Image (cartoon, rainbow, N blue to C red):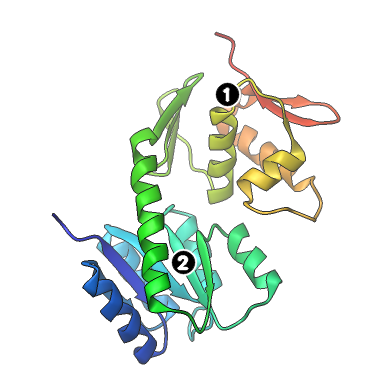
Amino acid sequence: MERLKILVVDDESRMRKLVKDFLTKSNYEVIEAEDGAQAIDLFFEQNDIALIILDVMMPNMDGWQVCKEIREYSKVPIIMLTAKSDERDELQGFELGVDEYISKPFSPKILVARVEAILRRTSQASADEVIEAGGILINKAAHSVLVDGHPVDLSYKEFELLTYFVENKGIALSREKILNSVWNYDYFGDARTIDTHVKKLRSKMGEKGELIRTIWGMGYKFEVNE
């Protein structure tokens, strides 16, 4: 069985070696990057990375920027490592699409357990990776969308939002519920951020954007006339 490949990104060589040793013992293939810029290069060169373990504080490009750039193209699971325990940092990580958030110092065994849990979840989800409704075809694994057979380029959040709408077809969804589900945490900011994302999403979908219907005073509903 082919070993899954994990990219470990940290500017401390000792930390990379520690994580690599534990992952290798668990039969993962590990490649390393010592800064954010190198991580981006390796990720797009390799094409088959199953998961990224990413440090926040690094030279050349920090972990937030690396995560942001990768999320424009891929849903690959990302575990963020940080020396900080600030709640704002954790919320920022989830908003960018981080799957797990682990503060240093940490137990390497716990890290490996988190890796295994995320990869199991990813593997189970792949069985239901393609969904379709109203001429919209969403491939979760490839992070791609076809509208009437034509590819549509969506940002990470737009993709997550459309997927959530299609998976909840015919259900009235409040802005708060959408924020909590798509943004992955209790959002205390302005709920109108949803309206901004829906507006952009509709414009990219052309006529199919009308399938996302506004429910005045509440939120939205994705509805297809069968």
Q: Is residue 92 left or right of residue 55?
A: right
Q: Quadrant of the N terminus?
A: bottom left
The residue that appears at 49% across and 55% down in the rendered structure is 72
**Which residue, as the protein is rendered here, is positioned at the far top?**
226
Q: 104 above or below 183? A: below
- Judge left or right: residue 24 versus residue 153: left
Residue type, numbered disc 2: Ile
| Quadrant assignment, res 97 | bottom right
Which of disc 2 and disc 1 is earlier in sequence?
2
Q: Position of residue 177 (x, y in %)?
A: 71, 40
Residue at the image position 21 percent from the left and 67 percent from the top: 27
Q: Quadrant of residue 64?
A: bottom right
- Is 162 drawn above or below residue 21 in the view shown? above
Which residue is tagged 2?
79
Disc marking residue 208: 1
For the residue pair 71 and 27, the one nearer the viewer reads as 27
218 or 203: nearer the eye?
A: 218
